[in-house]
């Protein structure tokens, strides 16, 4: 953990978690060439961010860190005392209030205090309108949402006009069939995540055994070969066999360094059918053969003793 490249990776993970804490789930930690526990955490953090993005923003609320394809123009009309007098129907979908709740509602009730102060400052200055600023709205049952708003006035009228771009909720631009398809997609995606997690756990629990063929694995997990292979590569950026091989070689390396078990026994205990194949794979992975690896003479663990 004290190596410089590990420290850099930890800092990157902290930055990613901070971005997630402030509502940005579109960041992504680039995968490194290292195959260790930190890299596993990186993959899991990326997966969590992806899941959070799909879960939180699928209903259509604005994510300020992402440009949405489906947006619509929404408008508020406020009187001189900042009460809401009229609005377009999209506002109802955006804020989650009913029409009767919004009519005559004071504008400060649906934005944060800081945003309202900024809003007042603009109206009290000699700034030429319209002007565009970011205001933080407070939907009825959701966290504050930052939206770019154009503030303007009508000629010879006291009303204040706010135009803002909001995302369109699925039910405002989609048919029921689309909603059902979208819901089906989300459920399918979560099922895929669980499937690949089960495969991941299975591999780690059976490193001492030869890896079954892709056909056997897909049958075992109730899916097809293409889905299993592509799903695993999508989440772990490596093939199923490469992951299996790397993990058993890492375990073998640990056993060589920290135990007195004979090398041939270690090769068998990690799923290799003969020592020459084990030695060749080990050298390809680490750059030296198993018998060249220094075995720790202090605190040996012997797994052959009773």
Image (cartoon, rainbow, N blue to C red):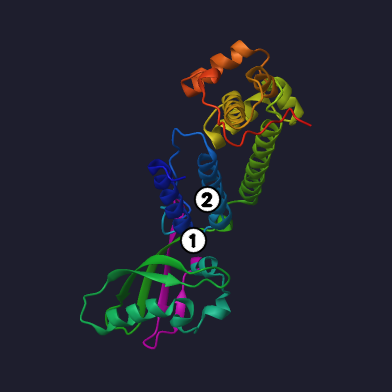
Q: Residue 135, image x and y in percent?
A: 38, 71
Give the SS element for disc 2: helix
Give the numbered dot on residue 49: 2
> Considering the image in quadrants, where does the C terminus appear?
top right
Task: Tell me if I can see residue 290 in this picture.
Answer: yes
Q: Residues within 10 Å of mark 1 (few under 14, many from 20)?
A: few
Task: Tell me if I can see residue 59 in this picture.
Answer: no
Viewer-nearest residue: 297 or 74: 297
- Is residue 72 magenta-colored? yes
56 shown above or below 210: below
Give the SS element for disc 1: helix
Viewer-nearest residue: 25 or 125: 25
Viewer-nearest residue: 179 or 220: 220
The residue sitting at 66% across, 39% down in the picture is: 197
Residues at circles 1 and 2 in contact by the CB criterion of under 8 Å: no
Q: Residue 43, image x and y in percent?
A: 53, 42
Residue found at the very far front of the displayed protein:
298
> Which quadrant of the figure has residue 83?
bottom left
Q: Is 272 on the left or on the right of 291, as rendered?
A: right
Residue behind mark 1 = 21
Q: Which residues are magenta?
A: 68-90
Q: Residues within 10 Å of mark 2 (few under 14, many from 20)?
A: many
Residue found at the very far right of the displayed protein:
306
User: How far apart are the two marked residues, 1 and 2, measured between alpha carbons?
Assistant: 10 Å
Residue found at the very far bottom of the displayed protein:
81
Give the numbered dot on residue 81: none
215 shown above or below 127: above
- Is residue 176 magenta-colored? no
Viewer-nearest residue: 250 or 43: 250
Q: Residue 263, image x and y in percent?
A: 63, 19
């Amino acid at each position: 953990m004290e190596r410089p490249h590990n420290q850099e990776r930890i800092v990157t993970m902290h930055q990613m978690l901070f971005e997630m804490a402030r509502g940005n789930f579109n960041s992504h930690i680039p995968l490194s060439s290292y195959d260790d526990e930190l890299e596993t955490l990186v993959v899991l953090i990326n997966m969590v961010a992806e899941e959070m993005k799909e879960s939180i923003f699928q209903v259509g609320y604005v994510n300020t860190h992402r440009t949405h394809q489906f947006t619509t123009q929404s408008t508020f009309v406020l009187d001189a005392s900042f009460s809401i007098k009229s609005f377009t129907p999209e506002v109802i979908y955006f804020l989650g209030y009913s029409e009767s709740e919004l009519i005559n509602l004071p504008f400060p009730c649906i934005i944060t205090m800081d945003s309202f102060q900024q809003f007042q400052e603009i109206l009290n200055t000699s700034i030429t309108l319209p002007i565009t600023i970011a205001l933080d709205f407070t939907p009825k049952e959701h966290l504050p949402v930052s939206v770019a708003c154009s503030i303007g006035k009508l000629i010879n009228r006291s009303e204040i006009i706010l135009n803002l771009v909001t995302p369109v909720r699925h039910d405002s631009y989609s048919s029921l069939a689309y909603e059902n398809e979208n819901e089906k997609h989300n459920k399918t995606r979560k099922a895929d995540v669980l499937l690949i997690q089960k495969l991941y756990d299975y591999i780690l629990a059976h490193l001492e055994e030869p890896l079954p063929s892709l056909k056997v694995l897909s049958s075992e997990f109730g899916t097809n070969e293409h889905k299993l292979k592509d799903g695993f590569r999508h989440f772990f950026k490596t093939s199923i066999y490469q992951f299996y091989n790397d993990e058993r070689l890492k375990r073998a390396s640990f056993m060589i360094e920290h135990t007195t078990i004979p090398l041939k026994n270690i090769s068998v205990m990690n799923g290799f059918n003969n020592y020459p194949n084990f030695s060749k794979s080990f050298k390809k992975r680490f750059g030296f053969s198993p018998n060249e690896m220094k075995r720790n003479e202090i605190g040996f663990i012997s797994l052959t003793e009773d």
